[in-house]
């Protein structure tokens, strides 16, 4: 599952770090680092983190829509 | 407070059970001047903007003489706790206190308390066995947070009962209508608790144990640490009681949501956030002061004015939340102000959320509720930390 | 047929082609579907990967806290697109409304969105750039290669250019325990984006963390050994340093070469478009079927004297893409202007650096809150007596306020009482931006061009 944090919105409230410390971390006082991919075992924690974000900066998706076509003959 | 004003009506106990019509009336004038020069701000964008405005102070000593100065040391002898300070003092205190409590230094401290709190929840619910009626406040919502805050601080469990009394007296003093009697009680509680904590801190200094007091004892002056511990007890206690009780009350008032929740426990996540919007445990913040003339929503708040930020009103602002009086856990983009925002964002929010996540799903998984025995339930006097004093409910059964 | 009917037909069965399958392209595609576009959607991207997030590539990916291949962007919704990944657009034919791909295919469109972004500016000397050990950092593959190298037993790294990316790389290297030399042509790190006053704070930060920072110095040559491996860098002060790795961080170049000869106003500074994201042709006439968004687009901003701004900002890519997508499939009166307040962030040496507004426009600066010597502050930039920008070090919670000040044209200097104000009176000082006529490394905002309201515009397409 994929996630991204809009770090323009993020103000370092760190609520996500409390709730899912394996996925989110503070680097210094307020800079947020996050794992852009997480596994099923973290899902509940990440959902709580996304819901708790005071500025709603966390976007999580569970979409499995295929990216249909990669050109095989180029590269 | 001048009688007859809307502020007086909000603090009037008669309106405690349902202040929301008053908040709706208040929002018609986003920034409203009371007769005594206090400004009430009640719409979402204006409240949020002021909460992030460096011209607004949390240090009530900036108020002109004659105004209530919540949080200032008069006779308690303790310095103001960090909630009543401004940067840079605020930031220094809060950063220090945060070191053993949260990230970046202690990201897993609270998570480590989860198991112990879950056990407390189990014990509390086990005691429902054989009863057909319980008081959610006394039997469930009240005991959990005091245990939690004692674990956070590192208070021995046998001393916990003493904390109940102190917490009550201190919390009620945040009420703008507490009066001299309430303020006096609060000061005595603060002193008693301060004395207890001074001993405890001294003990922790010599023999460190679990909890943040031991970690902070070498880092802070005893007076600052005492003031901090008092604040954490009050703010982390009463508000969480209200949050758990409000969630229970709201769910029992919305059987459709309750039914969904019982089928799908993962609904807890958005549901808890929606309760924090719908019935925020801190209804308004009456202790800010304008340091300069501030223009907001076509009104100028003059320098020195006390400013009340009405979180509960802002959380139901139709300009921000569609159909705001509807309790709707499916609400998207629920950027509520239930824990305030800006640099004074609730320090204990992660603890409160953890308690809610430990308590609420388990309560509704194990207990089969029949009905509310009193609706509305009796409320505490406090208009700021608003919540039921008791929540009697009839129950039909308990599962393991 | 009325224009409205055209729009309805377009929304039902039109063909929209997005060239550039990164953040802006993806968010545009999602917005198109969200707003009811039911026609065909083709996503063309030169990298063989689904859209991914770039900011982690110079931060957590270099630290090994996230793998570069795990940076795929979450989706807001399904987009039901035809993906053409791993093949670049080669040219645009406006007459036949076709995009030609490098594999010879042609893709017809009714509406075209260009989100081709930027690429890392390569080292100026191709043979030296090809040495083993010389890196740039822009893509997933760049990040993966650099991470492997940094964790593969190297001892000393040279970072060329102390803009945001270079500084972030230097920070990651120090955290990995590597010796780092940073060579910056300007007087301080971040000077192009934030000016010399704030640059001096970044300078202290780097040195405090053990970076061998050399400002006012440029790298004149990279020297390899017999095996084609980097072994030495020569500096403009005549000295040389032994290094195995050099990371070239000299800013970005806009991917517009494929548009040469197409007749659209595209060049090294980006693709000129109006505030509604519609691309101009070389005559300065706006097209109605070609749109641009993200790093590659530059458009006039009313808040900043209608200057054409090209913003290499994550948030700008998202919002401009949403505006472009909206405008592509609606009739004229429903179109929206792109009025984003520029916002930017960087994380380095454990400090969260953020800005709002356009700092390089500032002619004066005050420290409004906190203190520079604590490296925790909010600095406010003024331009002709009003607030034009603010930058914070570890004080992000205040920036929203200053954003409002910028948007409302609040007077500068901010002479009100405020919390954490350290002086009674604010004394505005020169923020010390480099002479705009001298080249600097990677400012995140490029100020170019003039208002479209000016009558005569001479457009000289550059050959990049």
Image: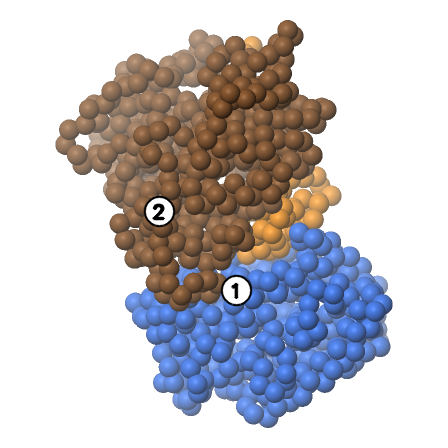
Chain colours: A orange, B blue, C brown
- Give the quadrant of residue B180: bottom right
In the image, taking residue B79 as reference, residue B399 lies left or right, namely right
What's the residue at 37%, 74% (across, down)?
A: B303
- Placement of B178 over or under C327, stated as above or below: below
- Placement of B184 over or under B266, stated as above or below: below
Residue B223 point in image, percent of width and height:
67, 75
Identify the residue at the far left of this view: C455
Q: Which residue is mark 2?
A: C430
At label 1, counting other C-alpha atoms closer than 10 Å, the crowd grade (few under 14, some 14-19, many 20 or more) is many
- Give the quadrant of residue B188: bottom right
Do marks 1 and 2 share a subunit?
no
Q: Which residue is mark 1?
A: B87
The disc placed on residue A59 is: none
How far is the residue under mark 1 from the one under mark 2?
26 Å
Residue B35 point in image, percent of width and height:
36, 85
- Give the quadrant of residue C460: top left
Chain letter of disc 2 in the image: C
Residue in the foreground of this view, choosing between B195 and C82 = B195
What's the residue at 41%, 47% (across, down)?
A: C356
Identify the residue at the far front of this view: C238
Chain letter of disc 1 in the image: B
What's the residue at 33%, 57% (across, down)?
A: C413
- For the C terminus of chain B, the image quarter is bottom right
In the image, taking residue B305 as reference, residue A54 lies left or right, namely right
Residue in the foreground of this view, choosing between B69 and C367 = C367
Q: Are marks 1 and 2 in contact (CB under 8 Å)?
A: no
Residue C289 point in image, percent of width and height:
30, 27
Residue B1 point in image, percent of width and height:
44, 87
Residue in the foreground of this view, choosing between A74 and B364 = A74
What's the residue at 34%, 70% (across, down)?
A: B293
Is residue C269 something one can see in this rendering?
Answer: yes
Label 1's element? loop
């Amino acid at each position: 599952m994929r996630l991204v944090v809009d770090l323009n919105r993020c103000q370092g409230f760190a609520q996500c770090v409390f709730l899912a410390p394996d996925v989110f971390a503070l680097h210094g006082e307020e800079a947020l680092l996050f794992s852009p991919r997480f596994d099923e075992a973290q899902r509940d924690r990440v959902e709580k983190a996304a819901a708790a974000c005071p500025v709603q900066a966390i976007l999580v998706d569970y979409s499995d829509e295929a990216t249909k076509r990669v050109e095989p003959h180029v590269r | 407070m001048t009688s007859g004003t809307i502020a007086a009506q909000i603090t009037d106990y008669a309106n405690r059970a349902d202040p929301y019509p008053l908040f709706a009336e208040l929002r018609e004038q986003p920034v409203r001047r009371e007769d005594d020069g206090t400004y009430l701000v009640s719409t979402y964008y204006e409240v949020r903007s002021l909460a992030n405005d460096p011209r607004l102070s949390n240090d009530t000593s900036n108020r002109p003489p004659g105004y209530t100065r919540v949080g200032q040391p008069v006779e308690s002898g303790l310095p103001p706790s960090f909630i009543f300070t401004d940067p840079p003092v605020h930031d220094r205190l809060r950063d220090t206190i945060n070191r053993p409590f949260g990230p970046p230094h202690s990201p897993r401290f609270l998570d480590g308390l989860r198991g112990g709190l879950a056990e407390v929840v189990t014990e509390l619910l086990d005691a429902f066995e054989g009863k057909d009626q319980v008081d959610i406040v006394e039997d469930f919502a009240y005991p959990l947070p005091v245990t939690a805050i004692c674990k956070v601080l590192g208070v021995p469990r046998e001393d916990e009962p003493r904390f109940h009394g102190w917490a009550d007296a201190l919390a009620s003093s945040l009420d703008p209508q507490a009066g001299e009697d309430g303020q006096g009680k609060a000061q005595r509680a603060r002193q008693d608790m301060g004395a207890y904590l001074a001993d405890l801190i001294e003990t922790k200094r010599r023999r460190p144990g679990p909890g943040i007091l031991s970690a902070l004892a070498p880092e802070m002056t005893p007076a600052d640490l005492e003031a901090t511990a008092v604040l954490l007890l009050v703010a982390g206690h009463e508000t969480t009681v209200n949050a758990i009780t409000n969630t229970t009350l709201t769910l029992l008032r919305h059987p459709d949501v309750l039914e969904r929740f019982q089928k799908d426990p993962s609904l807890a996540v958005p549901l808890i956030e929606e309760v924090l919007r719908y019935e925020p445990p801190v209804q308004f913040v009456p202790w800010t002061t304008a340091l300069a003339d501030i223009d907001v929503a076509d009104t100028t708040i003059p320098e020195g004015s006390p400013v009340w930020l009405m979180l509960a009103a802002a959380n139901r602002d139709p300009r921000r939340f569609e159909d705001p009086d509807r309790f709707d856990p499916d609400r998207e983009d629920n950027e509520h102000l239930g824990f305030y925002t800006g640099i004074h964002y609730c320090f204990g929010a992660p603890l409160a959320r953890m308690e809610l996540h430990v308590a609420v799903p388990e309560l509704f998984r194990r207990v089969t509720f029949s009905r509310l025995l009193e609706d509305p339930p009796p409320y505490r006097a406090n208009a700021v930390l608003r919540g039921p004093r008791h929540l009697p409910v009839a129950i039909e059964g308990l599962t393991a | 047929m009325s224009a409205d009917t055209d729009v309805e037909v377009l929304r039902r069965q039109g063909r929209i082609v997005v060239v550039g399958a990164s953040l802006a392209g993806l968010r545009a595609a999602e917005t198109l579907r969200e707003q009811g576009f039911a026609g065909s959607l083709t996503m063309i991207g030169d990298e063989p990967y689904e859209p991914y997030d770039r900011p982690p590539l110079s931060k957590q990916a270099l630290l090994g806290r996230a793998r570069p291949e795990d940076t795929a962007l979450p989706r807001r919704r399904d987009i039901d697109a035809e993906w053409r990944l791993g093949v670049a657009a080669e040219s645009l034919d406006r007459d036949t409304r076709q995009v030609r791909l490098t594999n010879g295919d042609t893709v017809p469109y009714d509406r075209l969105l260009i989100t081709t972004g930027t690429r890392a500016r390569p080292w100026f000397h191709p043979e030296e750039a090809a040495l083993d050990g010389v890196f740039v950092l822009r893509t997933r593959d760049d990040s993966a290669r650099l991470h492997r190298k940094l964790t593969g037993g190297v001892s000393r790294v040279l970072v060329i250019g102390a803009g945001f990316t270079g500084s972030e790389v230097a920070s990651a290297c120090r955290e990995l325990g590597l010796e780092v030399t940073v060579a910056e042509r300007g007087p301080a790190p971040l000077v192009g984006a934030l000016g010399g006053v704030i640059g001096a704070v970044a300078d202290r930060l780097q040195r405090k963390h053990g970076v061998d920072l050399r400002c006012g110095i440029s790298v004149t040559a990279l020297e390899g050994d017999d095996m084609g491996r980097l072994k030495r860098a020569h500096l403009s002060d005549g000295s040389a340093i032994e290094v195995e790795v050099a990371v070239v961080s000299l800013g970005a170049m806009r991917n517009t070469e494929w548009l040469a000869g197409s007749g659209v106003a595209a060049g090294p500074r980006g693709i000129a478009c109006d505030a509604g994201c519609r691309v101009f042709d070389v005559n300065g006439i706006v097209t109605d079927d070609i749109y641009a968004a993200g790093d590659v687009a530059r458009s006039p901003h009313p808040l900043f004297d209608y200057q054409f701004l090209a913003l290499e900002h994550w948030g700008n890519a998202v919002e401009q893409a949403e505006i472009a997508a909206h405008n592509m499939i609606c009739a004229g009166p429903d179109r929206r202007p792109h009025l984003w307040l520029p916002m930017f962030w960087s994380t380095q040496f454990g400090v969260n650096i953020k800005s709002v507004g356009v700092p390089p426009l500032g002619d004066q600066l005050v420290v409004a809150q906190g203190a520079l010597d604590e490296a925790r502050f909010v600095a406010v930039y003024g331009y002709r007596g009003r607030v034009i920008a603010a930058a914070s070090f570890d004080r992000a919670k205040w920036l929203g306020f200053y954003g409002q000040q910028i948007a409302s044209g609040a007077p500068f200097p901010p002479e009100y009482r405020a919390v954490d104000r350290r002086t009674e009176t604010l004394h505005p000082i020169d923020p010390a931006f480099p002479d705009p006529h001298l080249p600097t490394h990677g400012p995140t905002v490029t100020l170019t061009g003039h208002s479209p309201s000016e009558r005569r515009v001479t457009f000289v397409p550059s050959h990049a």
